[in-house]
Amino acid sequence: MVAVLKPGATQQQIDNLVAWLKSRGLDVHISVGRYRTILGLIGDTSQIDIDLLLGLDIIESVKRISEPFKSASRTFHPDDTVIDVAGRKIGGGHFQIIAGPCSVESEEQILNVAESVKEAGAGLLRGGAFKPRTSPYDFQGLRAEGIELLLEAKKRTGMPIVTEIMDASHLPLFEEVDVIQVGARNMQNFELLKELGKIRKPILLKRGLANTIKELLMSAEYIMAGGNPNVILCERGIRTFETYTRNTLDLSAVPLLHELTHLPVIVDPSHATGQARLVRPMALAAAAAGADGLMIEVHNNPLCALCDGPQSLTPEQFADVARRVWKIREAVTE
């Protein structure tokens, strides 16, 4: 349920109303927008008399939310959420490019890539320390050592870092990580999502390989219901019957998610296509579709990459893509 307050409501009136609602066993989320304040009521609202609320001097309107994703719903929070990552803002008109290798392989590699993508215009550095692989015999990442190398790259370049978590038991290793990524395979690892809801660190949540938009939003809801509102959604392609690409990039998800939720939406064209030559056109299309950012894999020597070399751009290719993306951004935001 959502209660919209009148512009003249005093803080004391708001505090009294919130206290009363909480006494009825409800959680109350307060959203202060540019023109109005909205109270989002979470819990069993069937006991709340709408007519009683409407009779209060400070209430302008009351509406029940039909969507099961209450906290993530735009009805609950009409204004875009802006996620601030060490000064790099995502959402609400702010656009960021996250770039770096699929996996951290060595100090030389990650520093080389970090410096090159920063120079080309990337705002955040990505790199896999823990790698979920289909085969147990494939490279699984450097794990804790990989995070240490990412932190060294952060220290050298000043770029915030993004890396994937595999298990809640690894959280102590992520204390200095700026954005924790939940990969497609863990999108419905609900116990992990609950633990991530207990922290305030930004969470980059990727859509699962065969999951619906509603399921993606419900996974975001798990994090937000735990108390962490800092969620970034990522469309990375879904599995279809098509075999010419690694996945099928669902760009229609971008404007649709913007209608349904206030959370930022970014696109990963690297995992979606699995082919470096397709990354540029899909990145440009994502920017034109209104994405709040891109996540692109970049490797200084893709032919020798230990993970996902075929979909990785060289630093030179990335610089070209970034330049073109910013031109698209200028065109669509005029």
Image (tube, rainbow, N blue to C red):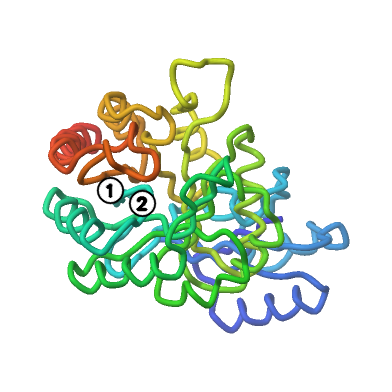
Q: Residues within 10 Å of mark 2 (few under 14, many from 20)?
A: some
Query: Is residue 327 found left or right of 171 in the rendered image?
Result: left
Which residue is more in the foreground, 245 or 6? 245
Secondary structure of the residue carrying tag 1 is strand
> Which residue: 50% across, 57% down?
231
Q: Which residue is mark 2?
A: 92
Q: In the picture, residue 82 is in which quadrant? A: bottom left
Q: Is residue 46 left or right of residue 78?
A: right
Q: Residue furthest bottom?
A: 12
- Find residue 44 and report its image quarter: bottom right
Q: Which mark is residue 97?
A: 1
Whole-percent x, y for residue 302 in the image: 26, 39
The quarter of the image holding the C terminus is top left
- In the figure, is residue 66 to the left or right of 318? right
Image quadrant in which the N terminus is located: bottom right
Which amino acid is tagged 2?
Gly
State which tag comes first along the sequence, 1 or 2: 2
